[in-house]
Image (cartoon, rainbow, N blue to C red):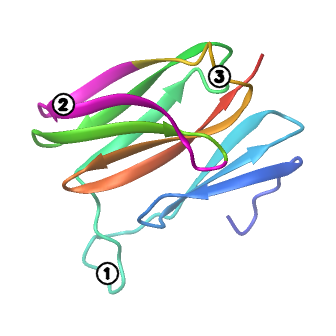
Amino acid sequence: AETAQFNGPNGIVATASGDTLYVSEFNSQAVRRIVRVRETANEPGAVPVATSRLLPVAPNPFIYATTIRMQLDEPQHVALTVYDALGRRVAVLADGARPAGTHSVPFDAGALAAGTYLVRLQTASGSDRMPLTLTR
């Protein structure tokens, strides 16, 4: 992050653990991810790694629909929710028990306005967030 250069940054979101930043760029319409890398989880001050996480969204940016993917290291209850830039809940994509493994959930945003949204994965083992950019 110390040497990162941006082309018109217009938004920033951090994960709950604070080890990942997402920066949206107006001019390139890209979302850049900056991850803090740790050598071991036993370092003083290291943030514990959650057993659940969101995987890269593809496509992102997207026009009408995209696929949200998540990795669960153990069976658990999952709440997968999408929020708009004002923090209002606009969609609940999943709310229930899921087995361990990789899961894909479609997100149809055809009724939403273009803009930046935030998808949030909440489990008993932690939470993760990722920005989504809807274009038209």
| Image disc number at residue 112 | 3
How far across and how far down the image is residue 107, in percent? 48, 19
82 and 121: which is toward the camera: 82
Residue shown at the point (25%, 77%) measured from the top left:
42
In magenta segment, residue 29: no
Which residue type carries mark 3?
Leu
Label 2 sits on residue: 101
Does label 2 or label 1 sit earlier along the sequence? 1
Near mark 3 (Cα within 10 A), the count class, few <14, some 14-19 or many ≥20, is few
Residue 46 found in image quarter: bottom left
Which residue type carries mark 2?
Gly
In magenta segment, residue 99: yes
Near mark 1 (Cα within 10 A), the count class, few <14, some 14-19 or many ≥20, is few
Q: Which residues are magenta?
A: 86-105
Task: Examine the residues drawn in magenta and state their main secondary structure.
Answer: strand
Which residue type carries mark 1?
Glu
How far across and how far down the image is residue 102, in percent? 25, 28
Residue 104 found in image quarter: top left
How far across and how far down the image is residue 44, in percent? 33, 86
Mark 2 and mark 1: span between their CA atoms? 28 Å
With respect to residue 37, does 84 lie above or below? above
| Image disc number at residue 43 | 1
